[in-house]
C-alpha cells in the first residue's frame, strides 16, 4: 500500500470499532470516494480471512484484479480509481475454512434489486434537506407527554402501481403524506426497509443493514420520503432488526470463513423458530456494527425513531429452545451481553438525537424496559403493550353474553399500565396467518362488527398509552393483510368502511386536541376509574386528566342500549359531548345521548356525584368534563 494513502485510514476509527465504541463506523467502513486522490476506498472487517479482493463490473469480476491488503486489526483495505455510482461490486473472500465466497459489503449504502445481490458504489450525499425547521422543533419535543398516534405500514402493499409492481419511495411519499396528515396521525412506522432478499420476510431478514432496499428506489428517494413526511409535521419511525440475520451466502453468515457476526457455539447460534442466525453481542466489533447502524438512520436519513424488533428473542438465552440453552455466567437465562448492547444503543441514540424515540417489541414481564440505564433499565422510550393487545382482542372475539364473565380482561391492563411507558399496538402481526383482520375478529353480525370495532378504538384512544394501528385498520379492511397486493381501497366506496375511516379521523383529532388524553400516560394522576365493576352490563367508564382538563370515556360492549345509565363523577360540573361512536355519519344506528349534561348529587362507586347518560349499543361516548368554578383546582382525590 502506498504510504500516501495511509492518512486516509484513520487508526482511531479502527480502534473504536475493535473496542465496541464506534458510533459512526459507516464513515470509514464500506465504499467511500476520497476526493483528494480521486479514488474509492474499500474497507471491510474480516480478521480471519486468508485473502480478499474487490470484484465488480469495473474489473470483469476478476478475483486477481483488485486485491485488498490486510491493514491492521482485521481490517482489509483497497483503493480503486475510475469508479462510478451504480457500479456493482462484492468482496471475493478466501475464508479461513478454505471457502471462496462472494460477499456483499456489510456497510454498502445501496444494492442491486433482488434477486441479484451485489452491492453498489454509491454516494449518499448531495440530497438537499428541507426539514430544518421540523428538526429544530423535534429537539424541544418530549414524546412521553406528547400525543403519539402511529400509522404502521408496509411500503410495498400500501399502494401498488400498474402490473402490481412496488411503488418507489418518491412515488408514494406525496400521497402518503397527504393521507396520513388528513387522517390526523402524528407518525408513520414503516416495516423494515434495509435490504433483504426474500419478499415474504416483509423485511425482517436483512442481508445489508446499511442499504435502503432497492425495491423502492435509491437512498436519495428514501431521503425524499422522510423529508416529505417531515414537511407535513409527521414523524418517521423505522422497524430495526438487530436480533438476527439470514443464512444467505452473500450476507453476514460465516463472513470470513468463521462465525464472525454470529455465535460460534452452535447452541447459541441459531433461532430454532426462524432458521436465522443470532448476533454475538459479546463481540465488540458486532456492537460497533449495530450501534453505528442505529445511528446511521438517524444521521443520514433523519428518522425520528427506531422500533426494535423481537427484543424478547434477544434478551432470553432460552428463547424458543425447549429448555436446551447455554446459561449466562451467573447461571441464568438472560443474555447479559444483549442487555449491555441494548442499554448502549439506547443511550447513544437518545443522547445524540433529542426528541427521537426507541421502541421495544417485547412481550414478557422483563423489568424496566423503559427505565434509564443509570437506574438499571434498558433505556427504551416506549414498549409495545402486548398484554393489552391480547386481552382486548380476546374479549372482542367473545360472544356478547359471555363478556360478563370475563369483565376484567378490559380492565386488567390498568394493574400494570404505569410500570413502563407503553404503546398500545394493533400491528401487522394481528392481521396475518389466519388471525383475521381487525374487523373480522369482532364478534357478531355485519353491523355489530363495525360498531364493536369503533368502540374498541374509542377504548384504546382513551386508555393510557400511545397509539398504533396498522394500515387498513382505519377503514376496516375485511381480508387479512397480503404483502403481495395493495390495500382494498375500493372498500371506501361503501358507507360502512368510509364511515369507519371518518371515525378514526375524528378519534385522532380529539386525541391530539385534548391534552387529558395524552399528557399523563405514566401515572394515576392521568386516569380515574368511574365505573369499573359493571360486569352485568359490560360497561366501563373512566376519566383522563391533565391538570384541570378532563375527558370522560364510557364504553358499552353489548348490543343493548343502556338508557338512563349513571356514571360516577368526582365533582360537580358540566359534561359536553365530544364523540358518539354510534353516529350515523360513522355507520352507527344513530342512538343519541345528551350533548350536554350536569352532575347530580347522587353518590355511586365511592364518589359524591354522578351523571346520567344514554349509552348506545356496542357504543362509546367521550365527554369533556369541566368542574364548577368553586371546585376547579381540586384533585380528584379531594
Image (cartoon, rainbow, N blue to C red):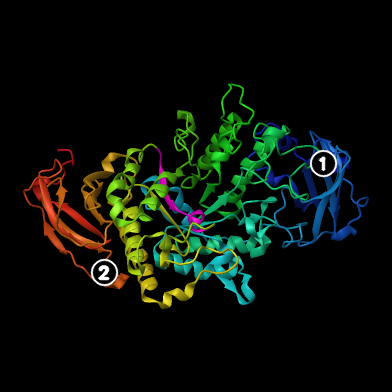
Q: Quadrant of residue 453?
A: bottom left
Residue picked out by circle 1 = 76
Nearer to us in this view, 629 or 585: 585
Residue farthest left in this picture: 601
Q: Is residue 401 left or right of residue 307?
A: left
Residue at 34% across, 46% down? 409
Q: Is residue 98 left or right of residue 150?
A: right
User: Magenta segment range?
Assistant: 420-432
Give the Cα separation between the discs numbered 2 and 1: 67 Å
Q: What is the x, y in percent for residue 468?
A: 43, 54
Residue picked out by circle 2 = 583
Q: Is residue 408 left or right of residue 568?
A: right
Secondary structure beneath dot 1 equals strand
Q: Is residue 217 visible?
A: no
- 431 within the magenta span: yes
Residue 428 marker? none
Q: Is residue 247 visible?
A: yes
Residue at 54% across, 57% down? 433
Nearer to us in this view, 573 or 366: 366
Nearer to us in this view, 119 or 244: 244
Q: Is residue 262 above or below residue 488?
A: above
Nearer to us in this view, 157 or 28: 157
Residue farthest top in this picture: 330
State how many labels appear: 2
Residue at 40% across, 39% down? 420
Q: Quadrant of the N terminus?
A: top right
Q: What is the x, y in percent for residue 524?
A: 28, 40
Amino acid at each position: 500500500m502506498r504510504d500516501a494513502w495511509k492518512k486516509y485510514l484513520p487508526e482511531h476509527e479502527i480502534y473504536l470499532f475493535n473496542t465496541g465504541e464506534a458510533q459512526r463506523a459507516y464513515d470509514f467502513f464500506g465504499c467511500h470516494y476520497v476526493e483528494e486522490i480521486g479514488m474509492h476506498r474499500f474497507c471491510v472487517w474480516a480478521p480471519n480471512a486468508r485473502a480478499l479482493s474487490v470484484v465488480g463490473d469495473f474489473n470483469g469480476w476478476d478475483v486477481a484484479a483488485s486485491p485488498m491488503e490486510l491493514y491492521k486489526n482485521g481490517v482489509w483495505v483497497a483503493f480503486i480509481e475510475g469508479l462510478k455510482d451504480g457500479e456493482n461490486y462484492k468482496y471475493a473472500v478466501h475464508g479461513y475454512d478454505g471457502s471462496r465466497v462472494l460477499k456483499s459489503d456489510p456497510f454498502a449504502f445501496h444494492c442491486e434489486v433482488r434477486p441479484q445481490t451485489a452491492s453498489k458504489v454509491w454516494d449518499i450525499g448531495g440530497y438537499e434537506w428541507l426539514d430544518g425547521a421540523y428538526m429544530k422543533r423535534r429537539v424541544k419535543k418530549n414524546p412521553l407527554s406528547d400525543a403519539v398516534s402511529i400509522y404502521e405500514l408496509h411500503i410495498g402493499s400500501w399502494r401498488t402501481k400498474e402490473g402490481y409492481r412496488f411503488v418507489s419511495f418518491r412515488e408514494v411519499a406525496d400521497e402518503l403524506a397527504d393521507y396520513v396528515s388528513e387522517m390526523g396521525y402524528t407518525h408513520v412506522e414503516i416495516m423494515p426497509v434495509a435490504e433483504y432478499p426474500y419478499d415474504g420476510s416483509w423485511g425482517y431478514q436483512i442481508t445489508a443493514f446499511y442499504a435502503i432496499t432497492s425495491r423502492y428506489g435509491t437512498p436519495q428517494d428514501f431521503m425524499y420520503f422522510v423529508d416529505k413526511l417531515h414537511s407535513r409535521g409527521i414523524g418517521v419511525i423505522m422497524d430495526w432488526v438487530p436480533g438476527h440475520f439470514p443464512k444467505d451466502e452473500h450476507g453476514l453468515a460465516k463472513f470470513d470463513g468463521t462465525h464472525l457476526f454470529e455465535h460460534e457455539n452452535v447452541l447459541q447460534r441459531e433461532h430454532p423458530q426462524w432458521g436465522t442466525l443470532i448476533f454475538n453481542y459479546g463481540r465488540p466489533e458486532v456492537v460497533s456494527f449495530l450501534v453505528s447502524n442505529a445511528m446511521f438512520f438517524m444521521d443520514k436519513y433523519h428518522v425520528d425513531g427506531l422500533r426494535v424488533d423481537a427484543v424478547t428473542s434477544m434478551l432470553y438465552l432460552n428463547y424458543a429452545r425447549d429448555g436446551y440453552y447455554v446459561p449466562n455466567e451467573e447461571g441464568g437465562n438472560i443474555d447479559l451481553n444483549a442487555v449491555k448492547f441494548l442499554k448502549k444503543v439506547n443511550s447513544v441514540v437518545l443522547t445524540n438525537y433529542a426528541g427521537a424515540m426507541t421502541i421495544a417489541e417485547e412481550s414478557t414481564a422483563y423489568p424496566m424496559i423503559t427505565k434509564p440505564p443509570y437506574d438499571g433499565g434498558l433505556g427504551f422510550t416506549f414498549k409495545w403493550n402486548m398484554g393489552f393487545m391480547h386481552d382486548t382482542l380476546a374479549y372482542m372475539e367473545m360472544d356478547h353474553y359471555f363478556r360478563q364473565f370475563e369483565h376484567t380482561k378490559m380492565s386488567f391492563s390498568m394493574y400494570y399500565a404505569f410500570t413502563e411507558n407503553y404503546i398500545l399496538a394493533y400491528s401487522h402481526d394481528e392481521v396475518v396467518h389466519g388471525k383475521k383482520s381487525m374487523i373480522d375478529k369482532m364478534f357478531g353480525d355485519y353491523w355489530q362488527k363495525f360498531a364493536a370495532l369503533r368502540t374498541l378504538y374509542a377504548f384504546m384512544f382513551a386508555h393510557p398509552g400511545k397509539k398504533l394501528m396498522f394500515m387498513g385498520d382505519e377503514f376496516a379492511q375485511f381480508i387479512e393483510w397480503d404483502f403481495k397486493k395493495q390495500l382494498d381501497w375500493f372498500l371506501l366506496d361503501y358507507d360502512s368502511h368510509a364511515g369507519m375511516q371518518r371515525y378514526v379521523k375524528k378519534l385522532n383529532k380529539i386525541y391530539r386536541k385534548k391534552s387529558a388524553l395524552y399528557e399523563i400516560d405514566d401515572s394515576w394522576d392521568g386516569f380515574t376509574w368511574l365505573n369499573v365493576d359493571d360486569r352485568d352490563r359490560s360497561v366501563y367508564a373512566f376519566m383522563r386528566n391533565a391538570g384541570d382538563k378532563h375527558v370522560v370515556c364510557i364504553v358499552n360492549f353489548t348490543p343493548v342500549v343502556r338508557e338512563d345509565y349513571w356514571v360516577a363523577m368526582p365533582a360537580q360540573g358540566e359534561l359536553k359531548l365530544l364523540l358518539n361512536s354510534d353516529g350515523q355519519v360513522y355507520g352507527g344506528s344513530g342512538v343519541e345521548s345528551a350533548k350536554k349534561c350536569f352532575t347530580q348529587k347522587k353518590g355511586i362507586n365511592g364518589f359524591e356525584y354522578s351523571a346520567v347518560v344514554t349509552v348506545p349499543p356496542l357504543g362509546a361516548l367521550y365527554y369533556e368534563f369541566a368542574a364548577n368554578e368553586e371546585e376547579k383546582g381540586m384533585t380528584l382525590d379531594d
